[in-house]
Amino acid sequence: MDGNGRWAQRRGMPRTAGHSAGSESFRRAAYYLKDLGVKYLTVYAFSTENWKRPPEEVSAIMSLLRKYLLESIEEMCRKNIRLRFLGDLAPLDGELKRLIERTDELSRQNDGMLVSVCLNYGGRAEIIRAAQALGRRCADGELRPEDVTEEALAAELYSAGAPDPDLVIRPGGEKRISNFLLWQSSYSEFYFTDTLWPDMDERELDKAIAEYQRRNRRFGGVK
Ligand code: FPP
């Protein structure tokens, strides 16, 4: 969800106002994509590297998440959306952790759409964590090294339970992956746009989807 800071600065507002607009854009995108029939949406809210930002900005983002979970979980449940968080949640503050657990409990049964929010998430860290889990299972004699398959590793990732993304959208003008879903996106289609995340409205999402529909996916084969 890149470009929040610039969106605010262009309007002479503090960067945190951009994150606030970004959180509204997230709500709107989730509801719109659900109406279109999208079953899985994964957004990158906070990376393992984002702790390097000024402490006031980090705490504003965490506050926005708390606010979102407090104010929006009921509405998300009414829309049959399951909301879950992917990443190392241990360093988060106690109240946010409790709200995440509550969100998990309240929305676990919903099967209209699975929305995953990556929080204190890094793609490499996710793969290392999965490799360690498999290593432990091998050391315990529960698994043989030859049982370490793509499926076995994918099942240990935070994202287990969701298919690999068909389309990865990067707003905000940068053309890089920035440690997002490294394993999962090996055959995803990528869409890069200069549009800043708070401006990624229904029209902009339609453009990304239309572009995706024109792509020729071969998964390494021929067509
Ligand atoms: C990247 O834009 C955005 C973030 C690091 C934070 C995203 C967080 C939210 C939208 C708020 C809470 C989220 C939810 C799911 C309710 P940037 O700050 O790097 O923008 P810039 O590149 O213009 O500086």
Image (tube, rainbow, N blue to C red):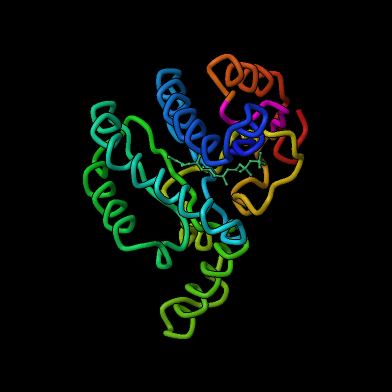
Q: Horizontal placement of 147 versus 223: left or right? A: left
Query: Which quarter of the figure has residue 70?
Result: top left
Residue 114 location, x and y as percent? 39, 38
Question: Where in the image, quadrant-wise, is ligand 1 located?
Answer: top right
Q: Residue at x 59, y 23 (%)?
A: 199
> Is the residue 15 above or below the residue 39 in the image?
below
User: 140 or 156: nearer the eye?
Assistant: 156
Marks counted in the figure total 0
Q: Residue at x 23, y 33 (%)?
A: 74
Q: Horizontal placement of 72 versus 211: left or right? A: left
Locate the C terminus by quadrant: top right
User: 202 or 123: nearer the eye?
Assistant: 202
Residue 129 location, x and y as percent? 52, 69
User: 58 or 167: nearer the eye?
Assistant: 58
> Is the residue 31 above or below the residue 156 in the image?
above
> Is the residue 52 above or below the residue 177 in the image?
below
Q: What residue occupies the far top of the structure in this picture? A: 203
User: 182 or 14: nearer the eye?
Assistant: 14
Q: Residue at x 50, y 62 (%)?
A: 152
- The stretch in magenta equals 191-198
Q: What residue occupies the far front of the structure in this picture? A: 12
Was residue 142 drawn as part of the magenta stretch in this picture? no
Residue 29 location, x and y as percent? 48, 26
Q: Horizontal placement of 131 versus 24: left or right? A: right
Q: Residue at x 25, y 33 (%)?
A: 77
Locate the N terminus by quadrant: top right
